[in-house]
Structure formats: C-alpha cells, structure tokens
Image: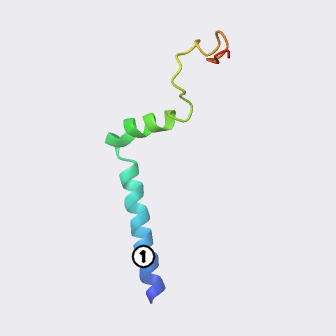
Amino acid sequence: MISGIVTTLLLLLFVGLWVWAWQPRLRSGFDATARLAVDDGVPAGEALAGDNGRTKA
C-alpha cells in the first residue's frame, strides 16, 4: 500500500518537473545555460591568435 502511494507521488513529481522544464518561456534561459559549457568568453578568432593569453615571465 505504501509503495503504491510513494510510486504515485514520484510519478506525479516527475510529470510536474517535466511539464515545468518544457515551458516555452524558460527556453531562452536553458539555452543560455547550455552554451556556458562551450563558451569560454573569448571572442571568435582571438583565441587562435598569439599565445592564447599566456604571459611571459
């Protein structure tokens, strides 16, 4: 009995989170967050020039 209630609650939680995550108004924020992994903050082409930002001691 208890396991059925827990399973139902977890299923409802999962569906609720899924619906929340797929809301169109959240897409731009999620897209920006996804780009953080590959965006190092250096403008395109600048990382290829020179010594990649290293300073000489």
Residue 32 versus residue 21: which sits nearer the camera? 32
Query: Most extreme residue toward the bottom, as rendered?
Result: 1
Q: On the image, numbered disc 1 is attached to which residue? A: 8
* Quarter occupied by residue 12: bottom left
- Residue farthest to the top, as pictured: 49
Q: Secondary structure at mark 1?
A: helix
Lateral position of residue 14 relative to residue 44, left or right: left
Quarter assignment of residue 4: bottom left
Q: Give the residue type that dot 1 points to.
A: Thr
What residue lies at 44% left-to-right and 63% top-to-bottom?
A: 14
15 versus 54 height, above or below: below
Residue located farthest toward the front when viewing the structure as drawn:
57
Front residue (pair 9, 38): 38
Q: Residue furthest left?
A: 25
Residue at position x 64%, y 18% in the image: 54
Determine whether, in the image, residue 13 is placed left or right of residue 41.
left
For residue 17, side relative to residue 49 (left or right): left
In the rendered image, residue 49, in percent from the top left (x then y), is placed at 64, 9
Q: How crowded is the residue under tag 1: few (<14 C-alpha within 10 Å), some, or many (20+)?
A: few
